[in-house]
Image: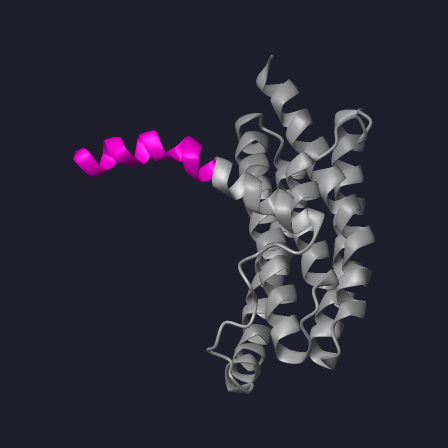
Amino acid sequence: MSLQDVFLEELRDLYSAENQLVKALPKMAKATKTESLKTAFTNHLEETKGQVERLKQAFQILGKKPTGQHCNGMEGVVEEGKDAIESDEEGATKDVELIGAALRVEHYEIAGYTAAIAIAKSLGQKEIAALLNANLQEEVAAGKLLLGESKPALAGAASAKDATKAEKSDTPKTAKERESKKKSEQDQAAAAPALKKSAKA
């Protein structure tokens, strides 16, 4: 596989990721009752639509189709956002969950654009690198905005009655929670040998 092939895969991955977000962001906006956070999600939806258009321009420059690859990583991060949307939490605590999920999305995208820009520059694709950099700057700005939104949400959640007391039982209630707990235990077991080695070193 050539570097050009890797570049195409990266771009198609980003294209898929942004299209998944176009579908997910309205649900995030609907899940919050906080007007400024709703606005942040709605504004970023419009930015995301613009990012999709920039990616289409990159494919036009390359003479390639943008489809052909599904971004599994973004699918997983969006699924975490869905968990936040569907949680029973309310108010500021719900917003903290939504912001956490959205920040994971932004950092995933920042990583993807950073890698794609480096490849574009290596291939001498300055015009595409500029398009990708415009998207990257919007993702960085969105991340900063979300961090700003987290301050009042965290303060509100912390001041809620009995905020420091664990209310949720460790016993999973739903099939999804049971599956998640099982996978978490498998992750721990798989990592244990490597963690033992590093503890001895």
Horizontal side of 111 relative to 56 (left or right) equals left
The quarter holding residue 14 reads top right
In the depicted structure, whether residue 15 falls above or below residue 143: above
In the image, 164 versus 130, the foreground residue is: 164
In the image, 24 versus 191, the foreground residue is: 191
Residue at the spot 68% in from the left edge and 35% down from the top edge = 72
Q: Is residue 106 magenta?
A: no
Q: Which residues are magenta?
A: 187-201
In the image, 193 versus 154, the foreground residue is: 193
Residue 29 drawn at (x, y percent): 77, 68
Quick check: can you spot residue 83? yes
Residue 168 drawn at (x, y percent): 57, 67
Horizontal side of 93 relative to 19 (left or right) equals left
The quarter holding residue 93 reads bottom right
In the image, 45 versus 2, the foreground residue is: 45
Residue 122 drawn at (x, y percent): 53, 27
Q: Is residue 195 magenta?
A: yes
Most common secondary structure along the magenta stretch? helix
